[in-house]
Amino acid sequence: MEQVNIHLPDGAERTFPKGTTVGEIINQIGIQNGTVGAKVNGRLVDFWFEIDADADLAPIGAGTEEGLFFIRHTAAHIMAEAVQSLFPDAKVTIGPVIENGFYYDFEYSRGFTPEDLEKIEAKMKEIIDQKKPLTRREVTRESAISLFDEEGENYKVEIVNDLPEGEKITIYDQGEWHDLCRGPHAPSTGYVKAFKLLSTAGAYWRGDERNPMLQRIYGTAFWNNKDLKNYLNKLEEAKKRDHRKLGKELDLFSIQDETGAGLVLWHPKGSRVRRVIEDFWRDQHERYGYELLYTPHIAKIDLWKTSGHLEFYNENMYPRMEVENTEYQIKPMNCPFHIMIYKTAIRSYRDLPLRWAEIGTVYRYERSGVLHGLLRVRGFSQDDAHIFCRPDQIEDEVIGVLDLTLMFLKTFGFDDYEIYLSTRPEKYVGTEDGWDKATEALRRALESKGIEYEVDEGGGAFYGPKIDLKIKDVLGRAWQCSTVQVDFNLPERFDMSFIGEDNNRHRTIMIHRAIFGSMERFFGVLIEHYGGAFPTWLSPVQVRIATIGDEQNQYAEELYQKLKSENIRVEKDVRNEKLGLKVREAQLEKIPYLLVIGKKEMDNGTVAPRKLGGENMSPMTIDEFVNHIAIELNPEKWREVEQQ
Ligand SMILES: [Zn+2]
Ligand SMILES: [Zn+2]
């Protein structure tokens, strides 16, 4: 019999007959209890996988991150069995593992209720307690179709019909119940020790709104109850911080049906925060050698032909409009406008680099199903900039962008990020040499800053290499915001050049970059990061004055005027209400400081500051108070106090 060599992680090598399953190997080499599956040549496989060639095999043990895939996929099957045993009319469709959990979509006449979920969970526990083995069998296309046809599982029939010719078709049995599946699975239902069904949603079959609406159930599973509990706590915390909920409670923004999906209305308080962010953004850009631009929202269609957007970006653009027999397009990007400004003059090598920045509002078509609060919208303002430079300036320019980016992120309270360098894909424009040099420049820029990064080999856009930066919020969630993208394409399309030292024309290098990504998205991330309790310098209302009785009204007005003259965003609460209520409301509105004034404070010419969170400070004069918070109002200094 033909033999295969199996290399184990400890360096040992064992020989087995060809076709031996992973399960048999694991049993024979006596790997510790709890092994849930294996990685064979880097691919996750279960005990049923047959080895037909020499391979590296690493068992995946209990408690491992990778093993969670097996556990969650098995939990999805258990849930589907439970649903069909409780609701025999429910039809199964698909049930994949997703980040942090799994779901399964059923065809059923109504949505599942919270009470249904409880029953399903109880049924799942029974199935788990039975420790039913999951066994795999290979079937022919015909027998799979007739099996699912007989059962009335028309979605499964459709899936089988769509499988490419020659693809192995496998069914996983757990007792009487089975599912069409490629695996991999845990060896038995007993492996699922800690799980929870989380929520329900409607979802179209294959994500297409012309198809029937299915009933989705989301769930998650972990190795143990402690991990599950931690995760559920984190979910709870994330729910409290949801920017859509806080945006409403704190009166920051709204998105309304009557205005249109994905179109953001910034309310006065949200606008105040945005204004503070934009002011800081503009000041710092000027300081870092950028010039600021304003450009229109629409442009003639010819511009988008030249830029290539019409050809390559059409599905993200809104329909055109006609004005005086000329077609116009609302802009999905700002880049072509900046290029048109570049082209109004002959640029010499001495003029470069040019750094041009704009908070430019763009509109992109997104399917209504993917829109999500401020994070995925149809109209948004990019904090955009383009750097036009010589090839030998790329590295310095990218270092400059990284400096500016890290400064911004630190200022806004983000200290952790993930950075990716994406390199040349298979299809690309520009020369190989140009790509290599630009990629090297990006790499050196990252290394000169001592920044750790991962390389996404071949993950670049077709027009140039890029650096992506994901910021991590307090809950450890990563958000894609900043990008630095070299572009070999647009300079070519627009024939952009500069006159070199040699008096010849040379192709200009264009770098696109955004730091926040968009004002909308960044605001959404900020709201969640701070749970709506912004640091004082960003807070829409920084100080509120609360009187204890009417006698202090005049004094309140004096303090109010004084703080206003210091450019502090201040409000006063002189209502004839109990102080307790005033305090509670200020807390709900997450105002950093409440200045309480009663008879004593008025007589002494002081205020009694109360911090958000409840700390009462000793009474002080209004000048002392202004002095006290000065550092918190300074974007460049405030983190010094925070860290004390
Ligand atoms: Zn499966
Ligand atoms: Zn651009």
Image (spheres, rainbow, N blue to C red):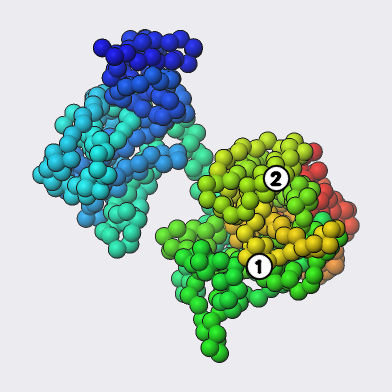
Task: Tell me the tag on residue 102.
Answer: none
Q: Are marks 2 and 1 in contact (CB under 8 Å)?
A: no
Task: Tell me the tag on residue 437.
Answer: 2
Residue 504, image quadrant: bottom right
Q: Which residue is located at x 35 percent, y 56 percent?
A: 207
Q: Secondary structure at mark 1?
A: loop
> Few, some or many C-alpha atoms within 10 Å of disc 1 (few <14, some 14-19, many ≥20)?
some
Q: Toward the viewer: 115 or 548?
A: 115
Q: Toward the viewer: 489 or 388?
A: 489
Q: Toward the viewer: 606 or 431?
A: 431
Taking 320 as reference, is 527 left or right?
right
Rendered-image quadrant of the C terminus: top right
Q: Amino acid at mark 1?
A: Phe
| Coordinates of residue 383 in the picture (x, y in percent) | 68, 61
**Residue 391 against residue 499 in the figure, above or below:** above
Q: Which residue is located at x 52 percent, y 46 percent?
A: 426
| Coordinates of residue 79 in the picture (x, y in percent) | 28, 38
Taking 68 as reference, is 641 left or right?
right
Task: Tell me the residue that label 1 is attached to.
Answer: 494
Q: Is mark 2 within 8 Å of ligand 2?
A: no
| Coordinates of residue 593 in the picture (x, y in percent) | 74, 54
Task: Name the N-terminal-most of marks 2 and 1.
Answer: 2
Residue 639, image quadrant: top right
**Residue 439 against residue 1 in the figure, above or below:** below
Q: Which residue is located at x 76 percent, y 57 percent?
A: 389
Q: Amino acid at mark 2?
A: Lys
Q: Toward the viewer: 141 or 112?
A: 141
Taking 128 as reference, is 559 left or right?
right
> Few, some or many C-alpha atoms within 10 Å of disc 2 (few <14, some 14-19, many ≥20)?
some
| Coordinates of residue 483 in the picture (x, y in percent) | 64, 51
Q: Which residue is located at x 80 percent, y 44 percent?
A: 641
